[in-house]
Image (cartoon, grey):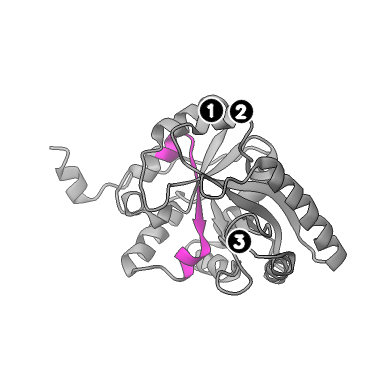
Amino acid sequence: MINMVDLHCHLLAGLDDGPRNWDDSLAMCRILAEQGVSHVAALAHQCERWNVQGDSIRVAVNELRQKIADARIQLEVHAAAEVMACPDLLTRWKMGKLVSLGDHGRHLLVEMPHGVFVDLRSTVRQFTQIGVRIILAHPELYPELLHEPGTIEELIHLGCLVQISTKSVTNPETKEDSKALRDWIRRGCVHFLGSDGHSPRKRQPLVIAAYKKIVDWTNESMAKDICFQNGLRVLKGQPVHVKTPAVERRWWSVLRLW
């Protein structure tokens, strides 16, 4: 059985747009375990729309752990949040309002505001300076990152790490998106995989097909780093060491420099 980590899954009943009740949460956990996922970041949105408090996440995770144990599901769940980028993100962090991945205070999963692309370079710098690494949630959904040479590489150089969603691997919007994402993975621009699961029905936490495709695109060793080893280090509060990928500039990007 393949061991995998799902670093992005909405599993906490009733906190956000994830599962409606604990039966749905357990159904999702069974799906994960059946695919070989051994550890999962059980998260909820932390943003203005949902206003989920850190303690609410921690209480829900402890309750889910007990239900998993009672149901004899082989899966370890870790407290986490998907935090929306905002101007006062660092202030909110210092006030203790945000839940990091694994709740160790070392890695913060950050998403762009809905439908908006923002420049996160300053945010990444600020958090890196205090010893916290930003993990960018599903950046491949933003053309400004996926199709602009050098943009994601600069963020990684500043200390950012990258989590992509399984659906982007298995069901990309376009052939161009698939090709660009494959290029990211091959060049070391991707560090984690997450299902972004929300439900046991419409948005299931499916990971195995994406893992197999990443193996086809690269090799088993790289796929295991992306789909297991790196995520496990984050959830255990350990550092993740990655190489900064070289920037691949296309000929029209070079021309713009002149």
User: Hey, what amino acid is under mark 3?
Assistant: Gly
User: Hey, what amino acid is under mark 1?
Assistant: Thr
Image check: 90 left or right of 57?
A: left
Q: CA distance from mark 3 to mark 2?
A: 26 Å
Q: Position of residue 17 (x, y in %)?
A: 57, 60
Image check: 201 left or right of 183?
A: right
Q: Residue at x 63, y 52 (%)?
A: 43
Residue range of the region highlighted in magenta in the rendering? 155-170
Earlier residue among tags 3 and 1: 3
Judging by the rendered image, the residue that carries numbered circle 2 is: 95
Give the SS element for disc 1: helix
Query: Which disc, if any, is residue 91?
Result: 1
User: Hey, what amino acid is under mark 2?
Assistant: Met
Image check: 30 left or right of 100?
A: right
Q: CA distance from mark 3 to mark 1?
A: 27 Å
Q: CA distance from mark 2 to mark 1?
A: 6 Å
> Crowding at label 3, few (<14), some or many (≥20) Cα neighbours within 10 Å?
many
- Does the stretch in magenta take in 164? yes
- Comparing 257 with 151, the one in front is 151
Rendered image quadrant of residue 86: top left
Query: Which disc, if any, is residue 18?
Result: 3
> Crowding at label 1, few (<14), some or many (≥20) Cα neighbours within 10 Å?
few
User: Where 17 falls versus 187 (above or below)?
Assistant: below
- Comparing 143 with 254, the one in front is 143
Q: Residue at x 30, y 47 (%)?
A: 149
- Comparing 106 with 9, the one in front is 9
Circle 2/circle 1 CB separation < 8 Å: yes
Q: Position of residue 139 (x, y in %)?
A: 43, 51
Q: Position of residue 163 (x, y in %)?
A: 52, 51
Rendered image quadrant of residue 203: bottom right
